[in-house]
Image (tube, helix red, strand yellow):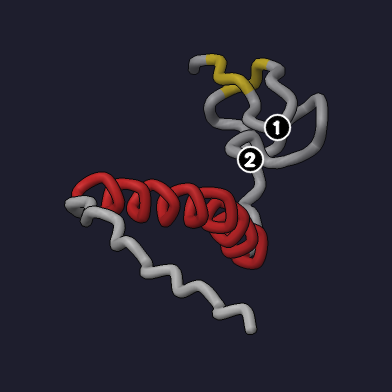
Amino acid sequence: MALVPCKVCGSLNSDQAEICLSCGYPTQGRKRPMIFQVAAIIIVLAFVLPTLLTAIYWIKLQLKPSSPPQQEKISRAKIY
């Protein structure tokens, strides 16, 4: 019999115990509902995706050869 920490509160329990004696939750922790996992993925994508797209756009600009600026012909208005 070995002592393992509870995944919820951290207190030591027997490895054969299913419920923590200190907090009353399962010693292996509670499984999160699927909605929390999906929400976490969406939040990560919301922060990472704009940064990733900006980096790709910046790299494209660096790789694209710069064309010389074209001079515009300035026409002067005739004064009558």
The front one of 8 and 1 is 8
Is residue 62 found left or right of 79 in the rendered image? Answer: left
Q: CA distance from mark 1 to mark 2?
A: 6 Å
Label 2 crowd (10 A; few <14 / some 14-19 / many >=20): some
Which quadrant of the figure contains the C terminus? bottom right
Q: Position of residue 54 (x, y in %)?
A: 44, 51
Furthest-bottom residue in view? 80
Q: Position of residue 72 (x, y in %)?
A: 37, 67
Look at the numbered discs 1 and 2 and tell me whether their residues touch, using CB distance below 8 Å. yes
The front one of 30 and 78 is 78
Identify the residue at horizontal 55%, vertical 19% (top origin): 4
Tell me which amino acid carries mark 2: Gly
Tell me which amino acid carries mark 1: Val
Is residue 71 found left or right of 53 in the rendered image? Answer: left
Instruction: Determine the image quadrant of residue 18.
Output: top right
Identify the residue at horizontal 32%, vertical 61% (top origin): 71
- Sequence-first disc among 1 and 2: 1
Is residue 73 found left or right of 6 in the rendered image? Answer: left
| Label 1: which secondary element | loop
Identify the residue at horizontal 65%, vertical 26% (top origin): 6
| Label 2: which secondary element | loop
Circle 2 is placed at which residue position? 29
The front one of 42 and 70 is 70
Q: Is residue 29 above or below residue 20?
A: below
Residue 8: which numbered mark, if any? 1
Residue 54: which numbered mark, if any? none
